[in-house]
Amino acid sequence: MRCSYADPHLHPNPVKGLGGEKIASKSKEANIWILGFLSLPPWDYELEPTLRNYEKIIDMIVKECRKSSGKGVKVKCFSGFHPAEVDILIDRYHLKPLEVLELGMKVLALIRDKCISGELDGVGEVGHQHYRTFSDRALISHKILEKALEISKDYGCPVQMHLENNEHSTVALIHETAMKIVGKPSRQIVFHHSKPSMAVQAYEKGYLSTVPGTKKPLLEYLFARTPPVYMLESDFVDDANRPNPVYPWDIAGMQELLLREGIVDEEYVCKVNRDNPREAFGV
Ligand SMILES: [Zn+2]
Ligand SMILES: [Zn+2]
């Protein structure tokens, strides 16, 4: 039994970085079978945040996914409206809170249409600010998250959520919201950038998570202490000017080493890299 690796959460950028195709080729070489590509906000592509440009970005990520799928790796394609975008649109671009809500809902409508047509596989990132912000902005982010869950319910597409990662409340609050909107938990509703303890809580309630896999000692610790109820993500932001990224192939390489050293067994690695992504992305 031998399983390939997975990176369900990264952000390709053909404008400032390697772009999807190169990422997919290098991932293929590192024995990665599935990648989750998520779009970035307009300014990361040197674009102003207009609805028209959001539409361009959705088209761009769809194109990146399509081109990259030809490289022998499965690519799952996501676009969303990141909670931090709410704050940046108000602080840097001087939109009014209600204008941000309206823009976010329109962007989500575009994403819904692409999920229906099958060009996008899911919605992400959406969620909550992981830092302190104003209550109206937090509410706007939450309303956008609710819209994403509605789309997930209606069209069966996965959602990747960026959340505050509070061990005492995050999973319970999302579970409550999901029960209200979707009616039942789903492994396709994914807690991204999850703490290991939160990943366990989320799994117990019927969800999946992605946990950052940045360094070998961290992986060692994670494997030793956590059951294989999550996926590993790089959250790689593809930008030549951003320092010290963790690449998807780094995570694959570290797992390869830990397997060879006997620190983790194949069954565990297969659950994290094969079974869980299959469930999360409905492969
Ligand atoms: Zn995030
Ligand atoms: Zn991310």
Image: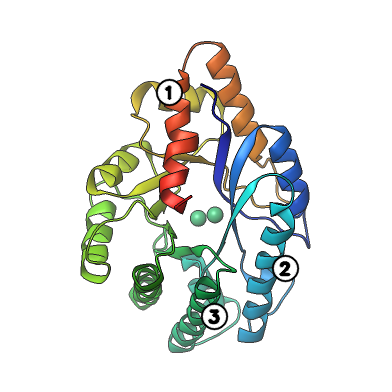
What residue is pinned by disc 2?
Answer: 45
Name the foreground residue: 171 vs 61: 61
Specify few, some or many for label 3: CA neighbours under 10 Å numbering under 14, 14-19, or 20 or more.
Answer: some
How far is the residue under mark 3 from the one under mark 2?
19 Å
Mark closer to the chain start, 1 or 3: 3
Q: Earlier in the sequence, mark 3 or mark 2?
A: 2
Q: Secondary structure at mark 2?
A: helix
- Residue type beneath disc 1: Glu
Report whether the residue tagged 1 is closer than 8 Å to ligand 2. no
Residue 157 sits in which quadrant? Answer: bottom left
Residue at 43%, 88% (x, y): give it. Answer: 98
Which element is circle 1 on? helix
Q: Residue at x 39, y 65 (%)?
A: 156
Note whether residue 213 is visible: yes
Q: Which residue does the numbered mark 1 point to in the structure image?
A: 267
Residue 117 drawn at (x, y percent):
55, 74
Give the x, y percent position of residue 212: 50, 40
> From the viewer's perspective, is residue 204 above or below residue 59?
above
- Label 3, on which residue? 110
Label 2 neighbourhood size at 10 Å, few (<14), some (14-19), many (20+)?
some
Looking at the image, the residue that sits furthest to the top is 261
- Label 1 crowd (10 A; few <14 / some 14-19 / many >=20): few
Disc nearest the viewer among 1 and 3: 1
Give the residue type at disc 2: Tyr
